[in-house]
Image: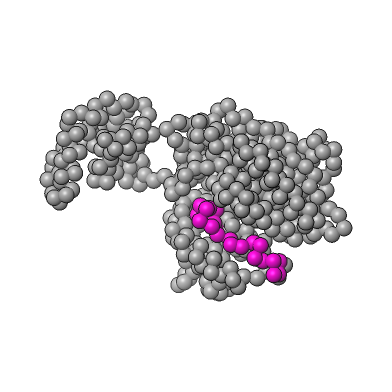
Amino acid sequence: AIGFSSSGYLLQKTFQSWCYQDMLSAKTTKLATFARLSRISGRTASRRNYITPRNLRHTAPASALLRSRIPTVYYSTQRVLEFRTGKSKEDQPKTLYDSLRETENCGVGLVASLKSVPTRKVVEDADEMLVRMSHRGGCGCDPASGDGAGVLVGMPDSFMRARAKELFDVELPPSGDYAVSNVFFPKGNPDAFKNCKATLERLCKERNLKVYGWRPVPVDNSMLGRDPVDSEPITEQIFVGNVGQKKYSNRDFERELMRIRKRTEDEAAAMLGPESGFYINSLTSQTITYKGQLTPGQVSEYFLDLRNPEFTSHMALVHSRFSTNTFPSWERAQPIRMMCHNGEINTLRGNKNWMFSRGGIMYSDYFGDETTQLLPATSDNMSDSGNFDSVLELLSKGSERSLPESIMMMVPEAWQDNTNLTESKKAFYEYNSCLMEPWDGPAMVAFTDGRYIGATLDRNGLRPSRYYVIKDDH
């Protein structure tokens, strides 16, 4: 009975258009019982002879016990076409589709102005790109409950200035000297809401940064399914300025914002526990992230800021999530703070262990003895993408490395015996292999810090991607 119930859920998710009334027929029950006995006795060949194509069509989906033995083509698009049209595979029109190559993963994209000119077109193109990758994202039995989607854009300067003037009656400092962040707070917990806000404000003031105030982010959740609504956080924006007598350089301002965010997260986890629902999406002067447990089509509908004609950007990363090895949640949606990711990090356990073991000797010239405030860089409470993003941020902001250098350090090419690489590039990879082991996929990583934007494959090259440079310098 458990097997049939499990299969029923999978069928509901895979074939929502049909209702299988004969799922618990006598023939199905007989087949499931036979499969169990056959597996015990090892008579696999006899069982395969017993499941004729006629039986396979009607009975195979009903038992989870058989799923590992049934050819994967059954759950493929080819099989769906057979159900929809009533035609066998041989009678279907010949196309380039091959069910044996059918796989599923996240959708990742980026769009940017090569001249770094913020326009409304970049935001609209990014949203269209995201919606067109809906097939790359996952959802539950309720199609309005997505696995996660989001967009990371350059700081919309004119838009944020207008909001600050409207709400706080202040003129923000020049671009690069203020930061705005979307922050998730757990719903239904007023004490946590108050305490987390107070912690973030206190740490900003300790680092001589000015907090202008908080802005509730306007949202419309009318199109969301039950699961994302049940876990929906309260989203507010904090405005922070780099002003006063002790004014930081742009790079040091970014470092201080990273320090504040990490310390706030640590104190919030001590108060509320890990994965409490409190989450700082990004805290930087260069970019801002709008994401959630949404479908790609819901992102611009949910976040009303993205619909405002004043909201512009010079670049954008978009991500449509297919949650494979973790449960969907608002904070696990991507893009994260500096990257978004298609694939999986299959060396994750080793990568995390090595980063943890390095913590005792890691030292930053800028942070000095307070480098420990940034550690540990990895956690079991984060997904593989979350851990990758955290280490990438630590390398690119905690040291003098640029973002491209940090990416090449973490995701090197297959440089050994590669005759197409220059000797200097081989030397770079060989040197850094002594400092950092590769974060191997298969994976494609798109990354940005607001200044640089790019994408790379891991050395296995199993997530091929393409890009276009078009005539209008995008």
Q: Residue at the location (73% across, 47% down)?
A: 198
Left or right, 428 with respect to 21, comes to right
Q: Residue at the location (62% across, 70% down)?
A: 362
Residue 69: image x %, image y %?
24, 46
Please tell me which residue lies in front, 195 or 110.
195
Give the answer, above or below, for where 417 lies relative to 443: below
The image quadrant that residue 82 belongs to is: top left
Residue 411: image x %, image y %?
52, 62
- Colour scheme of this structure image? one colour
Left or right, 303 with respect to 343, comes to right
Q: Residue at the location (68% across, 46% down)?
A: 196
Residue interval drawn in magenta: 367-388
Q: Is residue 373 magenta?
A: yes
Res. 176 in view: no
Please tell me which residue lies in front, 67 or 451.
67
Left or right, 8 with respect to 262, comes to left
Res. 249 in view: yes
Residue 125: image x %, image y %?
61, 38
| Total count of labels | 0
Report the quarter where the N terminus lies: top left
Give the answer, above or below, for where 380 lies relative to 225: below
Q: Is residue 347 magenta?
A: no
Q: Specify the farthest residue to the right.
A: 245
Q: Residue at the location (51% across, 62% down)?
A: 352
Please tell me which residue lies in front, 113 or 410.
410
Residue 55: image x %, image y %?
18, 34
